[in-house]
Amino acid sequence: MTEKPVQGFAGLWNISFGFLGIQIGFALQNANMSRIFQTLGGSLDDLSYLWVAAPLTGLLVQPIIGHYSDRTWTRFGRRRPYFFAGALLAAIALFAMPEARVLWLAAVTLWVLDASINVSMEPFRAFVGDMLRKDQHTAGYALQTAFIGAGAVIGSIFPYLLSRAGVSGEALSGVPDTVRYSFWFGGAALLLTVLWTVGTVREYSPEQMAAFGERDEAALQPVRALATRSFGSSLAWIAAGVAVIVAVPELGLQKEVYLLGALLAAYGAASIAAIRLARGSNPGNALSAIVGDFAGMPLVMKRLALVQFFSWSALFIMWIFTTPVVAQYMYGSSDPTSAAYNAGGDWVGVMFAAYNAIAAVAALLVLPRLAARIGKVK
């Protein structure tokens, strides 16, 4: 078995540089979509419906892209076609978003933007493992984390910097210029940084990966395990989904909870189909592989998933409602076309930049020391 070549700093930089632009686009979305929706006539009660594209596209796109990018080998590489396609579509969506003049068009553009960002972002997470030898993984992921933090800070704070430079923050016709120019900057930054990675990194061929000892011999193991499962857990998922749907009117819950029930029931139905396919003549199908990976997830990953569930629940509440709350209670305006409201929106970007900067420093400096002190998870 041969070793992968050692990458210098330039190689480490090139592998993860695209993440800088991706995170700029992601941060612009998180900090500014609520005020875009409200500027176009969306009410505070509508925001959670309008934002549903973000978690739903991530839920659907991430496992699909993860599955296919692991199995895609073209003359352009394994991950790079996904980088390029996702970045191109995301850049188009970022340029188009501030030009939306009606609410439904902005909502559709958010679906395109979030799906496209996920198409580019998910293969980047595996790119470090593909390109670096194991003793360089820590350095590779550390640099990737630095780019994520830097991109989040730049994207979040950019509208505020434009307003300080004298760009108008009033939404006289559509979104304010501070937001419009920030999205255009984000689209250009996302596309150019990803193109840098696509153009400077040459991926290894399947033969080279096999020589490195990284041929995936265990790819069908989750599917084989899935084929031996009964339909009991699948029916339990469906029952849980139906129970949630029935409980919405009975308990007076918000209508958004219907979506949760539908997702639970849909996963149960998908798992039944996946088990049947795994038992059939085509066990290598995508649905069985994705459901098999999920069903066979190690206990540690299931614990982490629970933590992630509560973390992302809080993050989406923050992303959706921070701008209208800060604008109304700290800047005294609930009129999204006013300068005061948009000054509040710009300040929310500063707040988001601060939390992203602190999180990046903690991830780079605090968490490694904490992990070394506590030890590995058992």
Image (cartoon, rainbow, N blue to C red):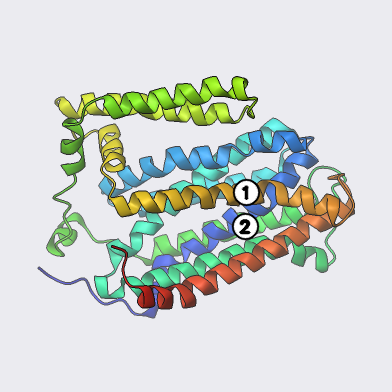
Residue at point 47%, 60% (across, down): 195
Give the residue number, with chain letter if any, for mark 1: 94
Left or right of 234 on screen, residue 1: left
> Where residue 192 appears, x then y in whole percent?
53, 61
- The numbered mark, 1 or 2, whose residue comes first in the sequence reads 1
> What is the distance, in whole Å, between disc 1 and disc 2 at their CAs?
7 Å
> Secondary structure under badge 2?
helix
Q: Is residue 368 above or below residue 282?
A: below
Circles 1 and 2 in contact, beta carbons < 8 Å: yes
How many marks on residues? 2
Crowd around label 1: few <14 · some 14–19 · many ≥20 (10 Å): many
Residue 273 x, y percent position in the rendering: 28, 24
Disc 2 target residue: 186
Please report the residue visible at 64 percent of the width from the left and 55 percent of the height from the top: 28
The quarter of the image holding the C terminus is bottom left
User: Quick check: 354 above or below 171?
Assistant: below
Q: Residues within 10 Å of mark 2 (few under 14, many from 20)?
A: many
Disc marking residue 50? none
Q: Residue at x 78, y 48 (%)?
A: 324
> 20 above or below 257?
below
Image position, residue 268 (x, y; %): 36, 27
Res. 84 in view: no
Badge 1 element? helix
Q: Is residue 247 left or right of residue 222?
A: right
Q: Looking at the picture, which amino acid does disc 1 mark?
A: Leu
| Position of 144 relative to 345 (above/below) | below
Front residue of 235/144: it is: 235
Viewport quadrant of the N terminus: bottom left
Left or right, 18 with respect to 317, comes to left
Residue 366, visible in the rendered structure: yes
Q: Position of residue 262 (x, y in %)?
A: 48, 26
